[in-house]
Image (cartoon, rainbow, N blue to C red):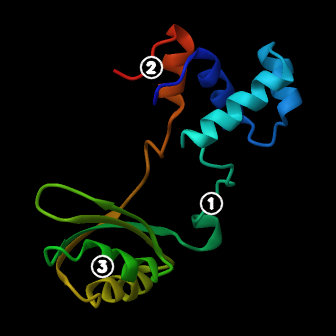
Amino acid sequence: MGEIDRLDARLLLLLTDEPRLGVLECSRRLGVARGTVQARMERLEQRGVLTGFPPEVGLAAMGYVLTAFAVLEIAQGKRAEVTERLRAIDEVCEVHATTGEGDLLVRMVATSNADLQRVIDEVVDVRWVSRTSTSIALSTPIPSRVRPLLEKVAANDEGPG
């Protein structure tokens, strides 16, 4: 149910490389009928594999030159409440519930060290956050990616596992 086949992977690779491609052009490049591509895209969207076509935004070019990660320890049973309050902080880009020392891993951005301090202060002021540990990212040698996983499936028609 959750796996993708070789054609799905090839379609997703094509859309990863060129998200503006239309269904007709995808069908031409993949050598399948337009209806096949349309049906595959709809199925991938329904299953939550294909979640949209947002543009990649260069945060540094927008002035957000710092990226930091904070591990938050929070009061037990308050994850939903803390998450909602973090959502209200514009510079918080991602929040992951984790195991281990902390409860939440937060990725945030800032325009300067002083701005990062302001953002951290906002995070620390969130009710039920008991402790934080923050690290600044110096570079991103491997940005978020799915290409290797799609290429693996496209090459040998095997899903995850």
Q: Estimate the x, y position of residue 12 in percent, counting from the top left.
A: 64, 31
x and y percent of residue 146 in the render? 50, 35
How far is disc 2 from disc 3 in space, using C-alphas?
35 Å
For label 2, the SS is loop
Q: Residues within 10 Å of mark 2 (few under 14, many from 20)?
A: some
Disc 3 residue type?
A: Val
| Residue at image mark 2 | 159
Secondary structure under badge 3? helix
- Residue 85 picture location, percent across and down: 38, 83
The kind of residue on which mark 2 rests is: Gly
Q: Which residue is mark 3?
A: 82
Front of the two marks 3 and 1 = 3
Name the residue: 44% across, 50% down: 140
Q: Which mark is residue 58?
A: 1
Q: Helix, strand or loop at disc 1?
A: loop
Mark 2 and mark 3 in contact? Answer it, CB < 8 Å: no
In the rendered image, the vertical position of residue 51 relative to residue 1, given as above or below = below
